[in-house]
Structure formats: C-alpha cells, structure tokens
Amino acid sequence: MKFTPPQLSVYFIAGTQDVSRPLREVLVEAAIGGITMFQLREKGSGSIQEEDKRLALALELKQVCHEYGIPFIVNDDVELALASGADGLHVGQEDLQAADARSKIGSSLILGVSAYTSEEAEQAVRDGADYIGVGPMYATRSKEDAKAVVGPERIEEMRRNGITIPITAIGGIAAEHVKTIISSGAEGVSVISAITAAESPEKAAAAFLAEIQKAAM
C-alpha cells in the first residue's frame, strides 16, 4: 500500500495489552469511526510473547485494516512485519536502527521512526523514514517507557529546522488538542488510550477525524 500523508490523520496504535476485550473488535469499531492507519504495538506487560500467536494476531488485524483500506503497520518487529505481509514498520530510538530497518524491509514498505529531538528527526530522514512520530505531546500512561513531555512546540521547532517529511504527534492526545497540534505542523495524531479506553471506539475515532477535518479547513 502506497504511503500518503493523509493516512496519518487519525493513527490508531494498540496491542492486546491495551484492551479488555478482543483487539479485533476494538479495531473494527475504530475503523468504522474513521481511523486512517493502524499500528500493532504488542509490547510491554500483558502482551503476547509467543511468535505463532503474534503472527496469528497480526494476520487477523491486517485483514481488518485492508477491508477498510487502512495501512497495517507493525511496531519494532521486522520479522513479524515481513511474515504478516504488513504495509510497514515503525521503530523507536531504542529499537532497530532506522537505516537497518529500511534495508531489511526494502523500499516499498512504509517506514515510521520515533523522533524526540530535531537531531533524531534529521537522522530519520537520512535513514529513509517516510514519516516521524513526535512526542509525548502531553502526559500519558499508555507507554511504560514514555519520555518527558515536549508539547506541540517540538513539532514547530522541527519544522523551523527544515524537517519536511510528514509528522504524527503522539502522547496523551485528546480530540480538543487536535487543532493546536495540526497548527504546529503535524499531519495528524496518533492515539492509544483515547480509543482503547473509550466507551465507544467508533465515536472516539469519529471525534478525532472531525477535529482533523475542521483543522484542515
């Protein structure tokens, strides 16, 4: 699936450790609500460790994504991304080096890279990233290894420093933050708990998409 910046509009990230019911159900509801990309982040306490079960989960979720025309991205695990036929891979600064990731997945798959500083963003560009994830925007409990909050100001700084590739903002984002984040220079927002913890993932996703559309007007 070819990458386009609007696919970052409402980027849903989740693993089984983030939900209290089948992840497939939550993903379907979020897809109906209007998410534009999904990343399987099976990581941390409570996540699936067995390779065969992780692959089965990835294949199940990829099928959902493709039914709704949404790119399916795998976090950190090159082998799982390739085995499942994922549309792309996302790596953090503590994961596989982005240049190595690009060489392993080839030029046709989407590569996302987490960048905390402008220097990391510049390196991600050199390494062949299609987009970067920047954050945390606000305080978050969804990631056990979350760094100190940088806020939308970090995106503005990156844009001033010449970073032109698409950016998705992540970390503690609620629908009311979208306007500020988009005006700072991001193409979209990445959310975990705002959808997984919502009473209605469909309504939560729809609220984010509505705010993205308003911000773009």
Image (tube, rainbow, N blue to C red):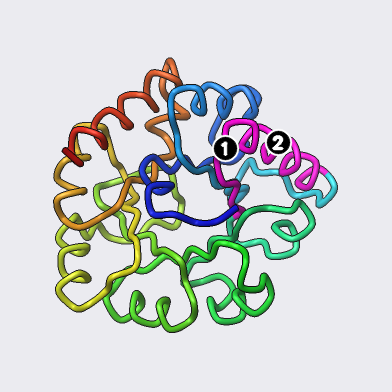
Residue 184, position as x, y percentages in the image:
16, 55
Look at 62% across and 66% down and name the residue there. 108
Observer-nearest of 82 and 214: 214
Q: What range is drawn magenta here? A: 53-74
Q: Nearer the viewer, mark 1 or mark 2?
A: 1
Q: Is residue 7 magenta?
A: no
Of the numbered discs 1 and 2, the one sitting upstream in the chain is 2
70 vs 11, left or right, is: right
What label sits on residue 142 in the rendered view? none
Instruction: Report the side of 169 relative to 158 (left or right).
Output: right
Number of residues whose C-alpha sits closer than 10 Å to that of mark 1, classed few (under 14), some (14–19) or many (20 or more): some
**Mark 2 highlights which residue?**
63
| Left or right of 95 on screen, residue 171 | left
* Residue at image point 35% right, 54% down: 168
Q: Is residue 62 magenta?
A: yes
Name the residue tied to disc 1.
Answer: 69
Give the main secondary structure, helix, strand or loop, of the magenta stretch.
helix
> Mark 1: which secondary structure?
loop
> Residue 212's x, y, as percent?
26, 37
Amino acid at pointer 1 = Gly
Relative to 163, residue 25 above or below = above
Front residue of 90/129: it is: 129
Question: Element at badge 2?
Answer: helix
Q: Relative to the observer, which residue lies in front, 71 or 92?
A: 71
